[in-house]
Amino acid sequence: MITDFHFIRPLLLFLLPLPVLILWLASRSGDVRSQWRGMIAPHLLDSLMVDGSKGSRIRPSWVLAGILVAGIVGAAGPTWQREPPPFVEDTAPLVIAVDLSQTMDAIDVTPSRIERAKLKIRDILDARQGSRTAIVAYAGSAHLVLPPTEDTALLESYSDALATRLMPKPGKDTAAALELADNLLEKEGATGTILLLTDGIEEAASKAIESNSNGMVILGVGTSAGGPVKTPDGGFASDASGSRLFTKLDIARLEEIGRETGADVATVTDDDTDVRWIAERVHSNFAQKQAKEGDRWHDLGWWLIVPLSIALALSFRSGWVVRTGVLLLAVHLFSPGSARAEGLMDMWLTHDQQGRIAFERGEFDAAAGHFIDPMWKGVALYRAGKFQEAVDALAAVETAESWYDQGNAFLHLGNYDEAVAAYGNALEKRKDWREAIANLAIAQQLLNAQKEKQEEQPEQPSEAPDSVQFDDKGKQGKEGMINVAEQTSEMWMKNIIVSPADLMARKFSIEAGRKAQ
């Protein structure tokens, strides 16, 4: 805080000598004897002078000087912390890398390590509603399950289908999983967190963890006592010697990796303690990155409004009326829900300043009602979920940030073609904007998917046919005969639904084959 403290508008501090000048002038104007000394003889001046009563120790000049000092300091914009821009998503991205090696079928935790890991993934997704999350599966090779998405239902559907039998290559390659996770976060244009759900980390992966530029959280799944490894047919796996395979969680090794690499390490718990711990680490990693990379300083000068208001009240004649007024003013300032507080707030704050206060409190509907600035009004409406109104407000501003926010609103409205155009306009005004490039790619994918879906739907005839004719010549012919069994089989094959597990197994196998080639 001390090292980051500075003023956003430091040139205004050159006005600080002004209060000193006022105090000097006030002291000279208050010395009546010096004013009349050159006009009245000294022996007569002493008789003519009448000293005033010393009722109040607080002089108006002092109050005025204090008001000016507080006003100048507040206008200079004291600050010591950054804030993220209001036009960029403020949710922490997360990539969950799930270990699907054979030992994850051990039953030292119920019902098994992999099933416990899947339950933890579901709890993490529930705690991160609205945040972008990706899932990576790895064993002897690493594969993408789902790219970063906010669709919790889709994430849960695919995470529930994870199983060790899906992996085409045995073993454990944590470094490959980290590389894939890094690439996903790099495409997102944001530094996030990688969560490893595993029952062990090989020696070769330590360097990959240490060199990782993103936040790293490792959750060990299993117990130090260990347990046997089940097979898909209900039996137990055997090692090379024919003995039953028995695997233990090397907690000491995980702790050593945490000390060497700086990664956060913990083991799975029966309650939600581990989930809350993970959520805190993910948020902490994101907050630290935002504090380092944020390009906006949080202006804290408006807090001086309260002492300024009290000082202005004290500048009037003292008495019970003024004291009561100060008390009522303080009550109204700290009671924004009061019906009459709005009038008092208008006395001290502009509509945009009132909107900013409501915005920072999370009262986005109220903030939108206060804002006059169309950019801030559009952002407040966007945060309130009123996307069409946000587009209408932002349309009055021709900046890269305005087009970017319009693109986000169009995405929520499902207007993917307009979103593509908006992101394109944003990139024309601000080249190499990573967030806009990433969102443009998403909007283009959604637009292409929408067009493909529309092309797959057969067009219905707009008019009824003039006549319908049947060809009776081929009724008994060889080509005119239809095998009902074949027709039913073909219809069944068209309507069959492939499970996410089958899709992933096929996808992983194809990817492994390509890598081998």
Image: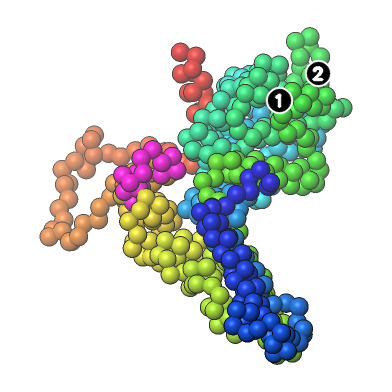
Residue 289 position within the rendered picture, expressed as x and y whole percent measured from the top left: 60, 40
| Dot placed on the residue nearer the N-terminal end, 2 or 1 | 2
Could you tell me which secondary element the residue under label 2 belongs to?
loop
Could you tell me which secondary element the residue under label 1 belongs to?
helix
Mark identifier at residue 261:
1
**Which corner quadrant of the image does residue 221 belong to?**
top right
Is residue 269 visible from the viewing direction of this image?
A: yes
**Which corner quadrant of the image does residue 165 belong to?**
top right
Residue 163 position within the rendered picture, expressed as x and y whole percent measured from the top left: 64, 32
Q: Nearer the viewer, mark 2 or mark 1?
A: 1
- Magenta stretch, residue numbers: 422-436
Seen at 76% across and 17% down, the residue is 238
**Which corner quadrant of the image does residue 262 belong to?**
top right
The kind of residue tagged 1 is: Thr
Seen at 76% across and 14% down, the residue is 239
115 or 90: which is nearer to us?
A: 90
C-alpha span from label 2 to label 1: 34 Å
515 or 378: which is nearer to us?
A: 378
Compared with 288, 417 (above or below) is: below
Compared with 385, 343 (above or below) is: below
Compared with 356, 435 (above or below) is: above
Badge 1 density bin: few <14, some 14–19, many ≥20, Cα 10 Å: some
Residue 456 position within the rendered picture, expressed as x and y whole percent measured from the top left: 31, 46
Residue 225 position within the rendered picture, expressed as x and y whole percent measured from the top left: 87, 27
User: Magenta residues: mostly which secondary structure?
Assistant: helix
Seen at 24% across and 34% down, the residue is 478
Count numbered badges in the picture: 2
Mark identifier at residue 244:
2
The single residue placed furthest to the left in the displayed view is: 466
Seen at 65% across and 25% down, the residue is 209
- Asked if the stretch drawn in magenta spans residue 432, the answer is yes
- Asked if the stretch drawn in magenta spans residue 359, the answer is no
